[in-house]
Image (cartoon, rainbow, N blue to C red):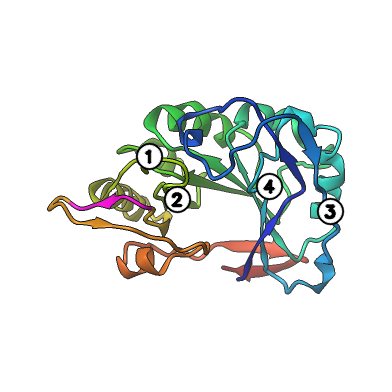
Amino acid sequence: SNALRLRFFKAKTEKHVSEACADCFIKLKGTFENCFYDFPFERFEKGTVIAVCLQSDFFLQEADRYRPMAWDRIKNNPHLIFLIITKRVERISSCLPKDWGDGYDNVVFCITAETQKRADERLPIVAEIPCKHRWITCCPLLEDIDLTLYLESKKFELVEILGEKSYHKEARPLEHSWVLNIREQCVKNNVGLALLGVGSNYRFDKGIILQDRCKCFTSPVAHSLKLDYHIPISFNLDGSEFII
């Protein structure tokens, strides 16, 4: 499916919330700003993937008054898949729409887990929140992580990995051994793995370093390593099954 970036709102935040933010491509200061776009959703093909708020966080407190409008758009476009990427898992439960039930069929919660500490903080919380689809987003992956406990729970469908890019300073390394370790965990538990990009400092054990300057969602450099582990994921879109 085609992936589109959808910015419901943008936050100009004054502080970072975790290690992953240290050299983020979004370097903003100041106050909150509403950037809701009136997208022609009906023109998108069934199964089109919408990445929501890549330049912000859907569960920012400053966005509380705009979020009901965003939920309304998501609910009224059941033919599309909305990826909601967040670090603020502690706010999800209080920010769900009244008719959420056990989750909208077309919504995926993508939880950032860049270190073991953040994985252990966030994943247990989202595992208990009613939701049809949950993904783990190790973007950027900053250390070797053991996700076995969460993958064994069968509550997570996919693990995404991305190396850090050097936007403002030298990128922190992504070790090949870390990716291999997570891949082994995913294969063992039959959970999908997607290496989205290797970043600017992907290191092998023999001193070889790869650099990836691709701006797309799926990197040719990452794809060439053949580390992905594809598991079909089914969505109930428009009342009928759709597989990606």
Give the quadrant of residue 28.
Answer: top right
On the image, the x and y values in percent for residue 83 come to 64, 52
Q: Which region of the structure is painted magenta? A: 200-204
Q: Name the residue tied to disc 3.
A: 73
* Image marks 2 and 1: residues in contact by CB distance under 8 Å: yes
On the image, the x and y values in percent for residue 181 come to 27, 47
Of badges 4 and 2, the one in the foreground is 4
Q: Name the residue tied to disc 2.
A: 159
Q: Name the residue tied to disc 4.
A: 53
Of badges 1 and 3, the one in the foreground is 3
Q: Name the residue tied to disc 1.
A: 147
* Image marks 4 and 2: residues in contact by CB distance under 8 Å: no
* Image marks 1 and 3: residues in contact by CB distance under 8 Å: no
Element type where label 1 sits in the image: loop
Q: Observer-nearest residue: 13 or 20?
A: 13
* Mark nearer the N terminus (3 vs 2): 3
On the image, the x and y values in percent for residue 68 come to 85, 40
Q: CA distance from mark 4 to mark 1?
A: 25 Å
- Amino acid beneath label 4: Cys
Rendered residue at 81%/73% (across/down): 43
Which quadrant would the C terminus be assigned to in this image?
A: bottom right
Q: CA distance from mark 1 to mark 3?
A: 33 Å
* Mark nearer the N terminus (4 vs 2): 4
Q: CA distance from mark 2 to mark 1?
A: 9 Å
Q: CA distance from mark 3 to mark 4?
A: 14 Å
Q: Observer-nearest residue: 10 or 154?
A: 10
Q: Main secondary structure of the magenta part?
A: loop
- The answer to whether 147 is drawn above or below residue 214 in the figure is above
Element type where label 2 sits in the image: strand
Of badges 4 and 1, the one in the foreground is 4
Give the quadrant of residue 126.
Answer: top right
Whether residue 133 sits left or right of residue 142 in the image: it is right
